Image (spheres, helix red, strand yellow):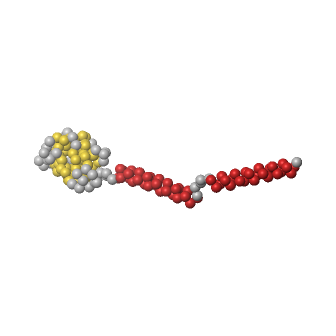
Amino acid sequence: MKNRKYLTDTRSVEKAKMDHKKFRKNAKALSPVIATIILIAVTVAVSVVVAAWMGALTIGFMGNAEQVSITNAQYVNSTAVTVSVQNTGSGTVTITNAYVDGNPATFKGVNNLGVVSASVVKGTTSTFTIKSATAFTITAQYTLKLLTAKGNTATTTYTYTGGS
């Protein structure tokens, strides 16, 4: 009986081996080389997407940098000063506010019309008249500050010497 049982077990084992061989023969698995190529392709694709995203962020933060400065200030009278503003940045700068010694001031364009904001195209210099709410005092020093739409400032200090 033991032999017969052993014989049955041997047949079962051999049958299982044959089934396993059939399975291995028909199994559709990826070879390690193909799997490696797919992993490399996915890694390259993800890195390209991340690089493009980071590049867009960098351009967004730095590509449109404002660089504006006041190159000249001349008094028109005891309440107004004409300023020349130079834009050395990479885009047009819009000046939204003007301050004389921290106090809000109004500004006018070349044609002397009141303007809400003034634009300076990149690579150019524009002239504007800033009108103070109070009269300037002779030999007093004043700080003129221009604020751009993006929150940057251009500041200069000058002394009123009288004049017109």
Q: Residue furthest left?
A: 164
Q: Which of these two is toward me, 27 or 34?
A: 27
Residue 31, given in percent of the width and then of the height, sits at 58, 58
Residue name at image x 72 percent, y 53 percent: 17
Residue 25 visible in the shown view: yes
Q: Which of these two is toward me, 163 or 72?
A: 72
Q: Residue furthest right?
A: 1
Question: In the image, 44: left or right of 7?
Answer: left
Question: In the image, 29: left or right of 71?
Answer: right
Residue name at image x 81 percent, y 49 percent: 8
Residue 114, given in percent of the width and then of the height, sits at 17, 40
Q: Which of these two is toward me, 67 or 132?
A: 67
Residue name at image x 18 percent, y 47 percent: 128
Residue name at image x 79 percent, y 52 percent: 10
Residue 81 visible in the shown view: no
- Quarter-wise, where is residue 117 in the image? top left
What is the tally of numbered marks visible in this picture?
0
Residue 91, given in percent of the width and then of the height, sits at 27, 52
Q: Residue furthest bottom?
A: 33
Q: Is residue 28 above or below residue 149?
A: below
Residue 80, given in percent of the width and then of the height, sits at 16, 44
Question: In the image, 45: left or right of 109?
Answer: right
